[in-house]
Amino acid sequence: MYSVFRNLAIIILSAKFFGLVARKFKAPQVVGEITAGLIIGPCLLNLVHISDTISIFAEIGVVLLMFSTGLGTNLKELIKAGPIATLIACVGVAVPLAGGTLLYSLFYGFSALGSQEFYRALFIGTIMTATSVSITVATLQELGHLKSFLGTTIVSAAVIDDVIGIVVLTCVLGASSGTGTGLGKVLMNTVLFFATAIGVGAANLVEPYACKTIIENLPAVMERYGMENLTEIIGGAHHG
């Protein structure tokens, strides 16, 4: 338990210190925080090691960051940015995928389509399509552009980019192993996730307006059906 709190203290203090240093150099704090991880981690000083506890705290931090992003996102701006974000995401997947595959082939030689070496090159290209939504969000939040149309477009494109990247990765791994792509299952899970998220969000969005409408129209409905004295009767029965 002592080592856990010691590691957390080192992480928080070093991340805050290097974040402030990065801000002094007109750079986002997340750059300083990443630098802190490189310095105190196994790369240099080896003061902190990856553990299950640290991983859990990291995941909780990312979840809270993305949740706060969702709370501050304008739904109208999100819908407006949808087509542009989708186009950006498609280009953001295609260019790294082709570039990574080509770069690997230039270093290790071009191989025939369907060979294991070809799939290795394709796998390197697929890896390069991945983005870090949390770092993007943290940077935009610090710069004050997260709620703007530009920030909404960037975040939306990053999310769509990751979804497309997962689909491409599944196809590449399935094709290289010869077990099938499993594309249908991935697409089904993705659609179910977004449908659930949109459904829950819409329910929470509609609920306040529904309650307000019911409260505003309740007296008229009670008067129409001769129930205008119902509240007095219930109140008298309760006190009696």
Image (cartoon, grey):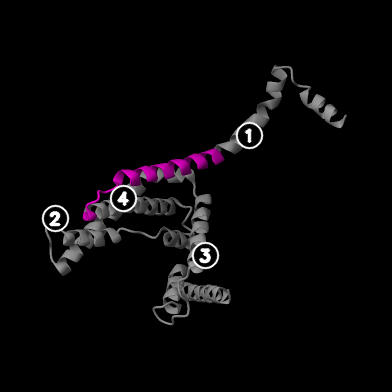
- The part of the chain drawn in magenta is 176-205
Pointers 2 and 1 in contact (CB under 8 A)? no
Above or below, 66 against 1 in this view is above
Viewer-side residue, 25 vs 106: 106
- Residue hosting label 3: 57
The residue under label 1 is 211
Residue on which the image places disc 4: 167
Q: Position of residue 225 (x, y in %)?
A: 70, 17
Amino acid type assigned to the residue bearing label 1 in the image: Cys
**Alpha carbons under labels 2 and 3: distance apart:** 43 Å
Please name the residue that numbered disc 2 is placed on.
113
Magenta stretch: includes residue 184? yes
Q: CA distance from mark 3 to mark 1?
A: 37 Å
Q: State the SS at label 2.
A: loop
Element class at badge 3: helix
Magenta stretch prevailing secondary structure: helix
Question: Where is residue 33 shown, x and y percent of the image?
Answer: 46, 71
In-front residue for pair 206/74: 206
Residue closer to the observer: 79 or 52 = 52
Mark positioned earlier in the residue sequence (4 or 2): 2
Please say if the residues under marks 4 and 2 sit with CB atoms less than 8 Å apart: no
| Local secondary structure at mark 1 | helix
